[in-house]
Amino acid sequence: MILDEIKQDYVKELVLKNESEDKRELLEFRKVLLEKNFVPNAEGSCLAHLGDTKVLAGVKIGLDSPYSDRPSEGLLSFNAEFVPLAHPDFEAGPPREKAIELARVVDRGIRGAESIDLKKMGQTGVEAKVLSVYVDLWVLDNCGNLIDCAALAAMSALRNTRMPKIEDGKLVREESSGQLEITRSVLTC
């Protein structure tokens, strides 16, 4: 109870000074840095820094069976993991509720903006198979603005994703057939 009051007083004091805890002005953005192609064996990746917050996004392309209710659409899937070293509240083990929610929010933003045309991903030329895009997010350092940083990492990784060639009904990861087509880029703020 006393700790909450101290935190509340501290936040009020910062607002009166028109600054944030890291000495930025209230409306000043954190420094942004994107390290694209950070993971060499992913089809696309990006390590995004938003201030001291760091999120790594990796993209893998698959060839899978479609959902029965959407047989002509490709698949898009997001997963998030909170690395225990990123914050004292993060624990090892299966994804907790906050990690699942982070993946859902990033998914909703990208899917809702129709950034990827899932109908085009359903046209593979391989019988009963569609392309699937798997986006994995790893929170490496949580110092605030986690949703913004994760969405930035995911979108940047998707924008630099190379599509593997499809040959004889299989993905040839060593050869590229071009970039993943992005119809609209999104950014959260």
Image (cartoon, grey):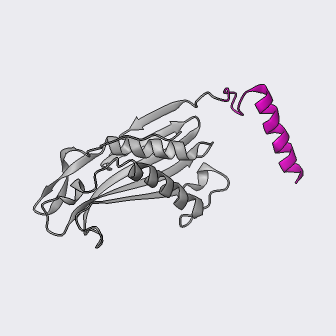
Q: Which residue lies furthest to the bottom in this view?
A: 68
Q: Which residue is drawn at 42% across and 57% down?
A: 78
Q: Residue at x 57, y 41 (%)?
A: 53
Magenta span contains residue 100:
no
Position of 51 relative to 63 (above/below): above
- Main secondary structure along the magenta-highlighted residues: helix
Position of 130 relative to 48 (above/below): below
Position of 93 relative to 141 (above/below): below
Residue 51: image quadrant is top right
**Residue 150, image x, y percentages:** 49, 46
Q: Residue furthest left?
A: 168
Q: Can residue 38 be seen in this view?
A: no
Segment tinted magenta in the rendering:
1-26
Q: Residue at x 35, y 51 (%)?
A: 59
Tell me if 125 is positioned left or right of 135 in this view: left
**Residue 100, image x, y percentages:** 52, 61
Tell me if 167 is positioned left or right of 93 in this view: left
Magenta span contains residue 22:
yes
For the N terminus, give its image quadrant.
bottom right
Q: Residue furthest right?
A: 2
